[in-house]
Image (tube, grey):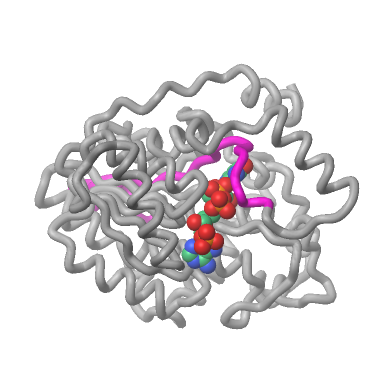
Amino acid sequence: MGFFLEFLWRQLFVWLPTPNYDFSGQTVIITGSNTGLGREAARHIVRLGAAKVILAVRTPAKGEAAAAEILESTKKTSSIIEVWELNLSSSASVKAFAKRAQGLARLDAVILNAGILTTQFALVEGEESSIVVNVVHNTLLALSLLPKLRESAAKTGLRGRIAFVGSDLQYLAKFAEGETPGNTFDVLRVEEKADMDDRYKVSKLLLACAVRAISAESPVSDKSNVIITYLTPGACKSDLFRDPMGGFQALALAIGKTIIGRSTEVGSRTLVNAVRPNQDVKVHGQFLMDGKVASAGPKINSPEGKKLEEKFHKELYDKLEQLSPGVTKI
Ligand SMILES: NC(=O)c1ccc[n+]([C@@H]2O[C@H](COP(=O)([O-])OP(=O)(O)OC[C@H]3O[C@@H](n4cnc5c(N)ncnc54)[C@H](OP(=O)(O)O)[C@@H]3O)[C@@H](O)[C@H]2O)c1
């Protein structure tokens, strides 16, 4: 089956069970949890008995509103949810957030869910915005939190979990810009040459390369009892597609979402599944689709993909070291 037939099949016929795991006593961070998939994942994890769920959001007032609504629907006490500010457009905010997390008594799981889809080119801290938010600062946050997760796992005896929210659209990335010689970041920050219709897919492809590299460098062991994985929630009816789009493209998207899109609640089940307390170590470094290990995709499973992964690993680590010296020494 081709990508589109498989995609349609999954959207229409795959049933995702309601999460039924025991998060008792655990502390979980979920980024971008004021709305969409992140908020629904938070609702499940609160319902499933977590001791502390941290909503990591860029606008605290939106986080507080989401917290109140989740508490109302789950009938839990307000002390369970904390709202912490996190702006993934700012490396200073990411570092401040990670520093604050060092003070937690424990940290069992992190869902790196916040992300953007935009066709508008904009520079943020010198790089194109989707590359910064979806890739650079997401991985900066993960690497900055990894020591805390390891420490916590050693203390509690429970394996830590990190799940990055990727996308199966990475399979469709053309990434023609990647054929231009030179550093990937240098190539992607040139507005005149940017293919913004492809950029979200490219950001998720590069995120996949990064997650695979980080997980290979940090195998699950006594020293690092933390599973690192990435996933797709499938196509969901959220505000992700908030960019103004014109004409036929906007109409096609609206119709497509209405007919085959999952609700954010259903999509969020894949996020909760990825960080479930009894997660299998065999998913470490793997791409999860509907809760199962899926192919990393043609852009990665090829000799060119291997080269891209190695090249981008080095480029990303150089960048992360500039942002936070020592952060890649995992
Ligand atoms: N929906 C889908 O069909 C689909 C499919 C595959 C993958 N995904 C992935 O799923 C994840 C969640 O998306 P969603 O569909 O739930 O979209 P959404 O409703 O737009 O939620 C995105 C979340 O990310 C936050 N965010 C965006 N930029 C941020 C920044 N600079 N700093 C901090 N937070 C930021 C948003 O905060 P604000 O509300 O403040 O903007 C929001 O909380 C994304 O990574 C997306 O790529 C979604």
Task: Spot the residue most to the right.
Answer: 247
- Residue placed most toward the observer, 171 or 266: 266
Quadrant of res 263: top right
Q: Position of residue 137 (x, y in %)?
A: 48, 68
Visible residue check, residue 83:
yes
Q: Nearer the viewer, residue 62 or 135?
A: 62
Whole-percent x, y for residue 211 in the image: 47, 53
Q: Quadrant of ligand 1?
A: bottom right
Marker count (numbered)? 0
Q: Farthest residue to the left: give it.
A: 155
Return the residue nearer the eye: 15 or 155: 15
Residue at figure coordinates x 17%, y 37% from the top left: 24
Q: Against 16, is 150 above or below?
A: below
Magenta span: helix, strand or loop, mainly? loop
Magenta-highlighted residues: 217-241
Image position, residue 326 (x, y; %): 34, 77
Q: Is residue 100 left or right of residue 328?
A: left
Task: Note whether 127 is above or below 118 in the view shown.
Answer: below
Q: Is residue 232 magenta?
A: yes
Query: In screen coordinates, is 302 left or right of 278?
Result: right
Can residue 6 be found in the magenta stretch? no
Give the vertical position of 165 relative to 117 (above or below): above
Viewer-proximal residue, 290 or 284? 290
Give how far across and how far down residue 52 sits, in percent. Answer: 22, 50
Which corner quadrant holds the N terminus?
Answer: top right
The quadrant of the rendering that contains the C terminus is bottom left
